[in-house]
Structures are given as C-alpha cells and as structure tokens.
Image: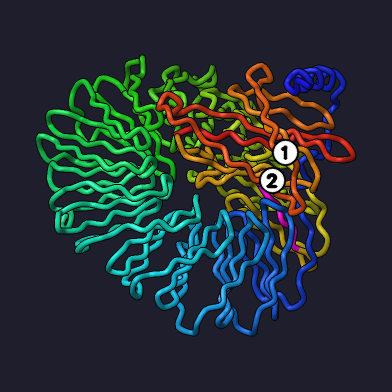
Amino acid sequence: MNLRKTLLAVAASACLAATGITQNPDGPYWNEYPIPAGMTAYNVLGSVVALEAPNAIHLYSGQLRKWTVQPVGNAPTLSITNSYCIIQDGTKIHGYSSRTGKVETLNVSATAALHVGSLSSSWVAVVVDGTTIYGWSGFYGEWVKQQLTAPAASTDLGSHAAVVTDGVNAYGWSAFYGTWVAQKISAMTAKHVFRNGALIGQSGPDSVLAFSSYANNWSSLQWSGAATAQAELQDGYALLQNGADFLVFDALQGVLSRRVEAATPQVISGRNVCVLATSTRTSCYAAGLGTWTVTPAPIAAANIQVAGGSFGALAMLDTGTGLVAFSGLTGTMTPLNASGTFSVSLGDTAAFADGGPSLRYAYSAIRDVWVPMPSSATANVLSVNPMFNGLVIETASGFDGFSARLAQWANNPVPGGTVVTQTSGALTLVTYNDRIEAFDSTICDWRSEPTAGLPNTTGRSIWRLCAIAVDRAQAHGYSLFHNTWEKVALQGTYQTHRANSSIGFALTSSHVYVFTANGSLSNNARFPEFSRFVVRGQPFRYMQTGPAGTLAVALIGTQHLESNLGAFGTLWMDPASMFTVPLGVIPTNGILDASLVAPQSTSFNGTILYMQSLLVPQQGQPWLSNAMRPIFL
C-alpha cells in the first residue's frame, strides 16, 4: 500500500467535496471539569493544571487531555512547573508528569531535601537523601536513583540540567535523557550551572569540565584561569573570559573550544548568538554550529543588536552605510540590499527594518533572507510588534504579519482593531467588536473567530503559543500546535481565565474549562511556542497519543502546504515532499513513543521538518493529528 499516493487521492477528492468542519478531528481541545468540593487554589503553567482541594490534588495533562486525582495529607507543598508537578507530603514525594499522566511516589527520610528548578521554566528536579540522590525529568516522569560516594556537597539546577557534586564526582542530569552521567573531578575552583548545562573549573591541572543536557555528556579542556574567569551563560552556549582569551562551550553539541582575540573585545550576547567586537575585527558566534563568522570590516559595539527572548537566533549589524543580518541558525551574514537610515526592531528569529515608506523590510533568521514589506508599506506605521517567530506591523490601513519560518507576509486589511501580543511568544491577536483575528506565525496566516462581543481587555489572554478569549457565554481558544480556533459554552457564572504557554483555562462558579494548545502529537523540546527545534545528531521523541489499538503512521515532509481533507482533518505539508514511516499500534496506555535521530550534518541547520500522524483506529474514521514543525539546530 502506497500511503503517500493514498493520501494524495484522499486530498484530491476531499478538497472537491469539503465544506469545512466544525470540529478538528484531532480534538476536542477544551475539557469541562466540575470544580472539586472545597477547592482552595488553582494553578496553570506550561502543560499542567493543578486544582488543590482538601486531601486531594486534581492534575490535568495537556498532552494526554485527562485528569488524575492524587490523594494527599493535610498540608502538602505543591511545586508546579512547565511539564510536571512535585507534591511534598511528609516523607512522600509525588512526581507528576504531563507526558505520562501518572504519579510516581518516592518514599524518603525526614531529612531528605527536594530541589525544584525555576517555577517559571523547569523540566528537572532532584531529591537528596543522605548519600542517595534521585533525578526527575518532566519529560519521562520517573525517579532515577544514583548512589554517591559521600554526602552531596552541592546541588544546582538549570531548566534542563542538574549537577550534583560529592567531592569525588560530578553527576550530570539531563531532562532530555533522564539518566545520571558521572565525571571524576579534582580540586574544584569554580562552578556555573545554566539552562542547558554546567561548567566546572578545576586545578591539578587547570581545566574546565562541561556538561551538556542536549548531548548528555561531559567534555573537558585544559585552560588556565577558570577560577577567575568572567562567565557569560546563555541557552545554547556559555563563555568563560579572561581578557582576550575565551573558552566557549557549545551546549547544543557538548563541545568545548578556545578563541583568542588580538585585544579584549566588547561582548554582545544573546541566547544562541554572541558577537565579539574589537577595533580590528567583529566576530559572530552561532551556537549549535560552533562557528565564528568575521565581518569584512570591524563594526562598533554600539551599532550591534543581538536578539533577546528565549531563542535569540540573530544579530543586526549597522555598518554605517547599511544593515547586515547574522543568522545564528545558518552562521551566515546577509546584507540588506537597500540604502537608507533604518530603525530596527528585533524578535528572536525576525527583524523589522524601517527606512520610511517603500523602504521597509523584514528579515528571517530561519531562512536568512530579507523580504520587502507589501504595498501597505507606504502607509503610516502605528506600531511594531516583534515576537519569537515573526512580527506584526500596524499601519493606518490594517495589519501586516510576517512569518520568519516561511519568510512571507500576510495582510489583515481592516484597521482599528486592538493588538494583543507578547514579545516572548509567537502569536498575536487583533480584536474587534465582533471577532478576533489571530496571526499565526507558524503558517503565516490570519485566523478569524467570531465572538459575541468581548467585555473589555481582560476578556482575552495570550501566552507563548496559546490564546484564550471569553465573551458573554463562551470561551475561545487558539493554538499554534493545531492552528485552529475552538470554542466551548460555559456553565455557571464566569469568574476568570488565563493562558500560559501551551495550556489555558476559564473558571466559572461551577466548572473549570481547560484548553490545551497541544494536540495528540508532541515531542520533547524547550521551545514549543515557535520552533520545537531539535539538535542535530541527537535523538528526539515522537510521542503520539490516541485510543489503544490505533495504527499510527508518521507523515514527514519538507515543504509547507495546507490542505483541508474534510473529515480527515488538515494536512499541513506538501504531499509531493512527503514520505511515510509506519510507527506501529498505540498500546494500552494510550501513548506511542518513538525515538528518531536528527541528522548530524551541519547542512541541515535551519531546516524545517513538517511532521504529522495518520491515525487509523480499529473502528471508525481515520484522522490526521496536529502538526509539529521542528527546526534542526
């Protein structure tokens, strides 16, 4: 059976007959749940909702779209993070992962210490109990034991990495692998733990050890001065600096290297891009590639901007006669082929250069191209709204959205709406009296949702990739993962609502309505809201949920195309670029896990892969999952 040809035939017939569908077959994405009796608190973060009630905590998984009730004692302590909850209940420590939908309980001594990462951005936790430690990954939802040679001397956590030392070894823990990796240490002189790894300076001999959560390994390099070096810690890399002498750690590939400048440079750093500027040369670093690109002529540090946010994949260089963009994904520089004086606004992977009417351009660090703004560029610019994966420009004639993924513009020609946006997200709303327009930067399109009137600005909430809006009798949700609006009728008296990353909720006097931005297809990634990047050469998870016994076939393509297949759902890739990989049958727990390995070649950097599943149940209508669009880095 040629599945690609079958899908092409289905697509052709469905496109002729399709009249639109009211419910995404991968849904529903709203869940209605009666408020537990005596509820004392509610929490929503990442992909988890937690409702606290006497003697029980009610936990909702955005991945699995199901509730789990965990009995507790009288005074438990709850820590909720992006993909897990830890409940400390006396000498019991309950760990809940939204990826498994299960609670794993650890029985510890009364002196055990629980270490939880940042409550705004964490996927790891560690319990230290005497000379035994336990690691927790929010992606795998298991307590993993490691015996120490002596009581722990230090315990440090980043978002995806944890490091415990005992004077003899350093033990690295990665959320992406869920395993402990031991490394012998000598006399430790300095230690820096950051989001995706750690650096340990040691003497005898002077050297640096580095742990990468992505590569799940320790590397080392002899280097003097680690004890006094200045540290610059970012998402994808870390720098140790002694004057003009730098030690560079590529946390994505787990590689240490050294760079020496002729003079002490000024350092302009962002999450995955760094620029070193001296009077004789300017060097741009691309994490993941581990490469330096030198400009033809030096550029003053004051004329260099580096993207912030969480991904930070570009730098903008003003040469005095024009603009040059540097992509941290491709490691290349591309000048703007236009002269003028420009004001520049940066998102994580997109930039907007405004030189006045007819001299307005967007830059995509994913595609490494400049794209002129469409004809509306002649109108007055009222606001510039950069975000992770694109930007929205408000003009006197409407709104123009730019997608860094597709390096394309999309126009919403109706002025007068109210912009609701978040620079640390990838979704922007424009609200009117009778509808909401969502600019979806992953597909470069405006998606409209009619409403019964929004009472005020508190009637809508946006965070990362998820939007929630409430009108008089309904709650509306939008997600960059399933690229669709869905609404639910509310029972009871409306009280409040909130979106947070890939989940949201609306609360009434009688029910909590949870909206998940996740579909049935997911993977392990820090950056779901705009890229879900996967690191070259490393395994990544293809997690498909669904009814037990359902056959799952992976559809993988390299080109974007939207095709409405009626009751089957939407195909989000060009069938001509697509191939299929049979994954097997979803087991009884409802979760089919497959591990795929990203290609190692640097030629894949910046490449977007389009991924969906074709799901064939034992009975009933086959359907298409939501889409994932990971970027290789």
Q: Quadrant of the N terminus?
A: top right
Residue receiving disc 1 = 584
- Identify the mark nearer the N-term, 1 or 2: 1
Tag nearer the camera, 1 or 2 = 1
Amino acid type, residue under disc 1 in the picture: Gly
- Residue at the spot 33% in from the left edge and 54% down from the top edge: 198
x, y percent for residue 412: 63, 28
Categorize mark 1 by other alpha carbons within 10 Å: few (<14), some (14-19), many (20+).
Answer: some
Find residue 484 and report its image quarter: top right
| x then y, percent, for residue 146 | 44, 66
Q: Is residue 54 above or below residue 242?
A: below
User: Which residue range is magenta in the image?
Assistant: 512-519
Is 548 or 345 nearer to us in this picture? 548
In the image, residue 560 above or below residue 231: above
Q: Amino acid at mark 2?
A: Leu
Residue that numbered label 2 is attached to: 592
Of helix, strand and loop, which mostly describes the magenta segment?
A: strand
Whole-percent x, y for residue 284 in the image: 27, 32
Give the residue drawn at x 72%, y 38%: 584
Q: CA distance from mark 1 to mark 2?
A: 8 Å
Depth order, front residue of 130/613: 130
On screen, residue 113 versus residue 275, left or right, reads right
The spot of residue 159 in percent (x, y) is 44, 55
* Coloration mode: rainbow
Viewer can see residue 453: no
Location of residue 211 with respect to 148 vertically, above or below: above
Observer-nearest of 186 and 414: 186
Residue most extreme to the right: 619
Quadrant position of residue 347: top left
Q: Quadrant of the C terminus?
A: top left
Mark 1 near mark 2, Cβ–Cβ under 8 Å?
yes
Does 167 sit above or below residue 537?
below
